[in-house]
Image: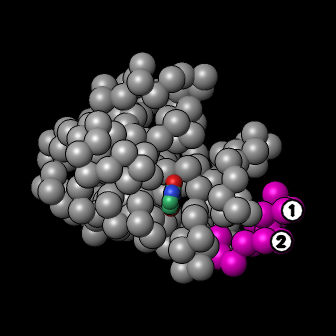
Amino acid sequence: MSPDAPGPDGPAQAALAALAQQVQGCTRCPELAETRTHVVAGAFPPGARLVVMGEAPGAQEDATGAPFVGRSGQLLDLLLAEAGGDRARTAVLNTLKCRPPGNRPPRPAESAHCRPWTEQQLGLAAPRLVVTLGLSATRWFLPRTALGAVRGVVHEVAGLRVLPTYHPSAALRGGPRGEPRRLLAEDLALAVRLVA
Ligand code: URA
């Protein structure tokens, strides 16, 4: 999508909502379909120019059906706000729409099953920039890459601008003065500037 892409408009919003309905009934991953409480399709506020992409729903997201509402989501909201951004104007989704039991990493087959949903969402959302949080989301665009090799820099992938950075869970693990939190804050500030 071009840098001046406007984000989802009325028809795209309707298509995103229809897609979110469709994904609710997905059974491509039998184990996840069996164990999930909610499918977490993602949040796409009208006109959002920035997409933030994580790995998979955690326990709180599975319980509520909304993405990034647990501790990682709260830190994301705080750092976005400190960067001059606003979660209410930011689209948020995950590579996987269902929580893997016990928060285990997504299996390759699960990632492959979910990929077409995410591809359609990104096509409809038409963001100016996608921020990928952590290795899973980054490898969705840049397979086999190391996060340290690509973070903090905008990459052009299949017509989208992609900015890899740390996952908020790494920032939580590293503590308030740790490097992951500092770099995540720095990268979110860059993201907010790039979509302004
Ligand atoms: N971690 C993620 O990657 N996504 C969520 O929605 C929550 C936690």
- For disc 1, the marked residue is 30
Residue 112 falls in image quadrant: top right
> Residue 68, percent across and down?
45, 65
Which structural element holds mark 1?
A: helix
Q: Find residue 34 and name its label.
A: 2
* Residue at the spot 57% in from the left edge and 40% down from the top edge: 136
Q: Is residue 120 above or below residue 182?
A: below
Reply above or below: 134 against 36: above
How far apart are the two marked residues, 2 and 1, measured between alpha carbons?
6 Å
The image quadrant where one finds the N terminus is top left
Do the residues bearing badges 2 and 1 touch, measured as CB atoms within 8 Å?
A: yes
Specify the segment rendered in magenta.
25-39
| Three-letter code for the amino acid on which mark 2 is drawn | Glu
Residue 32 percent coordinates (x, y)? 78, 63
Q: Is residue 188 above or below residue 124?
A: above
Q: Label 1: how many residues lie within 10 Å, few (<14), some (14-19) or many (20+)?
A: few
Q: Residues within 10 Å of mark 2 (few under 14, many from 20)?
A: few
Label disc, if present, on residue 147 of the rendered structure: none
Amino acid on which the number 1 mark rests in the picture? Pro
- In this view, the residue in front, 54 or 178, is 178
The residue that appears at 59% across and 56% down in the rendered structure is 56
Q: Main secondary structure of the magenta part?
A: loop
Q: Is residue 191 left or right of residue 145?
A: left
* Residue 43 visible, this angle: no
**What is the count of numbered marks?**
2
**Is 143 placed left or right of 90 in the picture?**
right
Q: Measuring 39% from the left and 40% from the top, which residue is drawn there? A: 166
